[in-house]
């Protein structure tokens, strides 16, 4: 169990989401950076479905009430355990009474705290993810508050070296697959969507211009600021299903990218769909940052998925080998 000693708005318990209920209007929720949470769970020996804590407002401080393995992934939040630095993308052991503190990251938006055994809250519709709009899941359907106690489930036997160990962050390990953006703008790959051609010449401007993530953005969707784009004629559309990554264009002409808490349906025309392998990068983009959309093909999207899968498999092998090697001398 951990006790929350300092937190801020929007820090929640999340897992990989609640699929299968969009047809009845229930959004999937889940981590904005599913890759970071997945790696954290691997490092502490959890199942892929285990829940962790998504931290996007800082400082965040927790005290451990028992000996617990934990991992910090996602944004480099300059973590410390009793004042001693804990590197990013790292797993370590905390003793009872120790204090873990996460500070505002210098870049990226969200850090993930994974605990051995996972955050043990009651599953709702097969998931422990917090739905803030629905008021369910997580810890009573709300953000974490100072004074909260978060229980952990039964942990598997995982052996860690003294001081822990880390993995190469995906942005470094896969720098050829996820290239840095030009001019400070994040490059996000997407496929043209159903109403793409209705925008005529404005469709080209969607791809060519930089877009700024506006302050009106949240876990439901990123609203983008830039030179507005419009269809060639007014389009009257019935509401249709949407999922994370869909880029819709409302009448004002500034796109909205659906994110983890994406609406289940909407009637705005769709100009593009972000490839799934780039959603974790978008989930780490900060308010006010710039991005550019780059057209991708289905073949390219599949190749990026394979590279990402290979990275995850390599982390899983590394964690298993470290634990097995230490178990033989324990």
Image (cartoon, grey):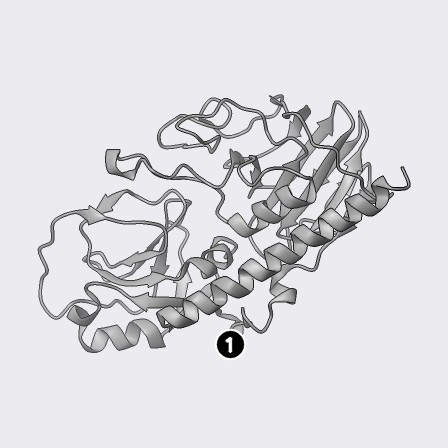
Compared to residue 27, the image places residue 227 above or below, namely below
Residue drawn at the location 19% of the way across and 48% of the way down: 240
Report helix, strand or loop for mark 1.
helix
Q: Where residue 120 appears, x then y in whole percent?
A: 58, 25
Q: Is residue 232 left or right of residue 146?
A: left
Which residue is depicted at the point 62% across and 42% down?
41
Badge 1: how crowded within 10 Å, few (<14), some, or many (20+)?
few
Seen in the picture, residue 289 relative to 118 is either above or below; the reply is below
Between 329 and 299, the one nearer to me in the picture: 329
Residue 1: give x, y in percent of width and height: 68, 23
Would residue 248 be found to the left or right of residue 302 on screen?
A: left
Which residue occupies 20% across, 54% down? 268
Which residue is identified by label 1?
182
- In percent of width and height, residue 173 lies at 65, 65
Q: Quadrant of the C terminus?
A: top right
- For residue 29, above or below residue 119: below
Can residue 104 be seen from the camera position used here?
no
Residue 192 visible in this rendered orientation of the protein: yes
Q: In the rendering, at what x and y percent does residue 154 appear?
A: 66, 25
- Relative side of 229 to 234, left or right: right
């Amino acid at each position: 169990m951990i006790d929350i000693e300092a937190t801020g708005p929007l820090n929640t318990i999340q897992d990989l989401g609640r699929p299968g209920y969009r047809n009845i209007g229930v959004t999937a929720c889940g981590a904005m950076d599913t890759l970071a949470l997945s790696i954290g769970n691997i490092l502490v020996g959890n199942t892929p479905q285990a829940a962790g804590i998504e931290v996007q407002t800082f400082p965040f401080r927790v005290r451990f009430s028992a000996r617990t393995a934990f991992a910090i992934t996602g944004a480099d939040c300059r973590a410390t355990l009793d004042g001693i630095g804990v590197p990013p993308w790292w797993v370590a052991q905390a003793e009872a009474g120790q204090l873990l503190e996460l500070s505002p990251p210098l870049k990226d938006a969200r850090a993930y705290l994974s605990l051995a055994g996972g955050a043990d809250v009651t599953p709702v519709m097969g998931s422990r993810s917090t739905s803030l709009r629905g008021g369910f899941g997580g810890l009573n359907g709300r953000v974490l508050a100072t004074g909260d106690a978060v229980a952990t489930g039964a942990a598997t036997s995982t052996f860690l070296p003294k001081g822990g160990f880390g993995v190469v962050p995906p942005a470094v390990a896969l720098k050829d697959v996820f290239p840095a953006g030009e001019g400070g703008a994040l490059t996000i790959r997407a496929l043209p969507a159903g109403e793409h051609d209705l925008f005529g010449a404005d469709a080209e401007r969607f791809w060519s211009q930089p877009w700024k993530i506006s302050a009106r953005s949240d876990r439901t969707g990123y609203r983008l600021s830039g030179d507005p784009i419009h269809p060639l004629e007014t389009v009257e559309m019935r509401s249709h299903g949407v999922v994370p990554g869909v880029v819709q264009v409302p009448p004002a002409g500034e796109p909205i990218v659906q994110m983890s808490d994406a609406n289940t349906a909407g009637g705005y025309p769709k100009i593009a769909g972000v490839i799934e392998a780039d959603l974790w990068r978008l989930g780490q983009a900060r308010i006010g940052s710039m991005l550019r959309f780059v057209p991708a093909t289905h073949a390219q999207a599949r190749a990026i998925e394979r590279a990402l899968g290979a990275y995850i498999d390599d982390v899983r092998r590394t964690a298993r080998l470290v634990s097995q090697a230490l178990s033989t001398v324990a």
